[in-house]
Image (cartoon, grey):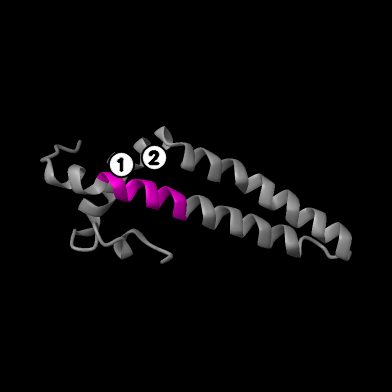
Amino acid sequence: MRIFWATKQIPELAALSPGERAAAWRRVYRKTYHHWQTWLSLLLCPAFTALGSYFDNLLDTSYVAMLIGAALGGLLFGETTIYVARRYYKAELSRPHQDG
């Protein structure tokens, strides 16, 4: 699985200008919340954070594992959102849009 760190790395958006890329992302982003995968990954963010906190208590460390858990939860949510959004891009980018 490839990790996308920026929208310009998403193959469907790579050829677009920064403004077009941002507009396409905004149009599709809202649609990702219609899918169970997005909601599950969003719910897993605090679960990963809590698991990290548990390991902090177990290992007697100060927030290190909790921060790692939170970062992993955020990464999972971001990548899941991109995965779901990519399903929409072919149809979304083939239609003309008026922004503004």
Query: How far from the left and from the top, in percent, is residue 96?
Result: 10, 40
Amino acid at the residue labelled 2:
Thr
Residue interval drawn in magenta: 79-88
> Regarding mark 1 in the picture, which secondary structure is present there?
helix
Q: Is residue 37 toward the left or the right of residue 9 in the image?
A: right
Tell me if mark 1 has few (under 14), some (14-19) or many (20+) residues whose alpha carbon lies within 10 angstroms of its own: many
Q: From the image, which quarter does the N terminus lie in? A: bottom left
Q: Is residue 19 toward the left or the right of residue 48 in the image?
A: left
Tell me what residue is drawn at x 74 percent, y 62 percent: 65
Query: How far from the left and from the top, in percent, is residue 4?
Result: 40, 63
Query: How far from the left and from the top, in percent, is residue 72?
Result: 60, 59
Tell me if mark 2 has few (under 14), some (14-19) or many (20+) residues whose alpha carbon lies within 10 angstroms of its own: many
Contact flag, marks 1 and 2 (Cβ < 8 Å): yes
Q: Nearer the viewer, residue 91 or 68?
A: 91
Amino acid at the residue labelled 1:
Val
The residue wearing badge 2 is 32
The residue wearing badge 1 is 28
Residue 34 higher or lower than 84, as above or below: above
Q: Nearer the viewer, residue 19 or 75?
A: 75
Tell me what residue is drawn at x 47 percent, y 42 percent: 38
Tell me what residue is drawn at x 18 percent, y 43 percent: 91
